[in-house]
Each structure stands twice: as C-alpha cells, then as structure tokens.
Image (cartoon, coloured by chain):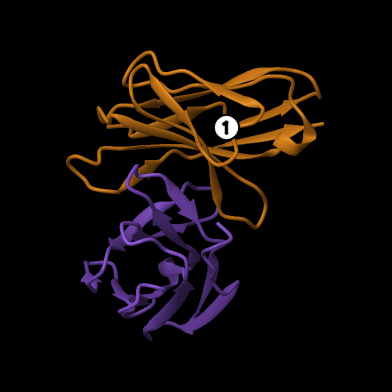
Amino acid sequence: NAGVTQTPKFRILKIGQSMTLQCTQDMNHNYMYWYRQDPGMGLKLIYYSVGAGITDKGEVPNGYNVSRSTTEDFPLRLELAAPSQTSVYFCASSAPETMPYEQYFGPGTRLTVT
Amino acid sequence: DAKTTQPNSMESNEEEPVHLPCNHSTISGTDYIHWYRQLPSQGPEYVIHGLTSNVNNRMASLAIAEDRKSSTLILHRATLRDAAVYYCIRSNTGNQFYFGTGTSLTVIP
C-alpha cells in the first residue's frame, strides 16, 4: 500500500492564480481530510469528507473548495490564491469503523503564494 | 486549537522517561484525546489516544486526569528517534481533529 499520496510536493503560485492539490489513498478509507499548517503552528482542518459525494467545512474553509467523487480521491481547489494561503497542506484519511480515531497523513504539499 | 495548550519545547536525556503535558480545560465529555508526532518534512503520525482511562501501547502511555482537563504523554525511554514535535489533539464525535500548538522534544545523547 502506498497509503496517502499528495501531489505536487512543492508549488509557487502568483496572487490570483488557481490550482488543485491532489490527494489519493489506497486504503479504502471512507473519511478524508485536508489540513493546513502554518509555520510553527499545529494543523488546522480545512475540509473533510465522510464518504464519496459528502463534504463539509472544517475550521478554516474560506478560499478553498473540495469535491469527493470517488472513495480514493479528495482534491483541494484554491481559487484566487492569496499570500495568506502560503502554508503546508496535508491530506489525511481514516476508517473510524475499523481503526477508531487514527488518521493517516500524506507527506504534504508546500505552497508559496507571492 | 486555542483550547489545547502545550509547552513549546522540552528536553530529555537519552534513555530517560519523558513526560509531555497538555491542558485541554474545555474538553467536552465525548471528545477523545490523541497524541501524534511529526518529524521534519513529514506528516503527523499516530502515537496514542484515549477517552477517560489511562492507555498503554508499544510506543507510549497516556495518563488522563480524572477531570479530563489535562493529560500527559509518557515516553518510557527516550531515544534519538523520538526527537519530534508532539501534538496533543482533541477530536469530536465526527472524528474532526483540533490540534494544539505542539511541543518540540529534543533528546540529548
């Protein structure tokens, strides 16, 4: 199993550009999450999904959109990038019904908006 | 999460026990307490979790105060590989995680 994979690893965007961060998991987990981590801080939840076709907002959803058309994929869309979105983005997945409350994290995408 | 506070940093000598504290004074009765650790340039990885009772696993122990307003992660014998940022996290019934600011653990050989 590859676990949770994220692409790209690094990206530099200009202000106002858009991009999609990709996240795929091969563990057949129903739950998936997107977090951002600002320097020296803990992670904050952006959006999450409890299954294909179902998404919901977390703590810091403004400026982002998500979709979940399959169990495996959970892309995060940034529209009109702003410097405040400079951060490291982590995707995670979990299967609460079999491994209660353990989340598996990807390696992260480091995004800089200038 | 402003409601979950941890010391910024701690040091430990190698092969000695380490006690990492966390305050979560506004935790609700159904929130779980988790500990994850993060190595540089990696995503967090699971260490341990609990609700009310103390918990042990092969990596660590988790001691939860009787009033649940604080908890302590215990690494029984610190090794150099345990140097990381340790996050105390509370989760709600929807399995949403709310991270503390983390404690950077330095292990001294």
| Element class at badge 1 | loop
Dot 1 alpha-carbon crowd within 10 angstroms: few under 14, some 14 to 19, many 20 or more:
some
Percent of width and height locating residue B31: 35, 57
Q: Which chain is purple?
A: B
For the point 41% across and 44% down, the residue is: B96
* B24 lies above or below B39: below
Residue B100 vs residue A105, the one in the foreground: B100
Determine the residue located farthest toward the left in the rendered image. Answer: A98
For the point 46% across and 68% down, the residue is: B24
For the point 47% across and 71% down, the residue is: B25
Q: Which chain is orange?
A: A
Can you say which quadrant of the picture contains the N terminus of chain B? bottom right
Percent of width and height locating residue B27: 42, 63
Residue beneath label 1, please?
A9
The disc numbered 1 marks a residue on which chain? A
- Left/right placement of residue B8 relative to residue A49 reads right
- Left/right placement of residue B77 relative to residue A61 reads left
* A109 lies above or below B50: above
- Left/right placement of residue B92 relative to residue A67 reads left
Percent of width and height locating residue A86: 71, 37
Percent of width and height locating residue B7: 57, 74
Determine the residue located farthest toward the top in the rendered image. Answer: A69
All told, the count of numbered labels is 1
Residue B26 vs residue A71, the one in the foreground: B26
Task: Residue A40: name its quadrant.
Answer: bottom right
Residue B68 vs residue A87, the one in the foreground: B68
Task: Residue A20: name its quadrant.
Answer: top right
Q: Kindly identify the amino acid type of the residue bearing the numbered disc 1.
A: Lys
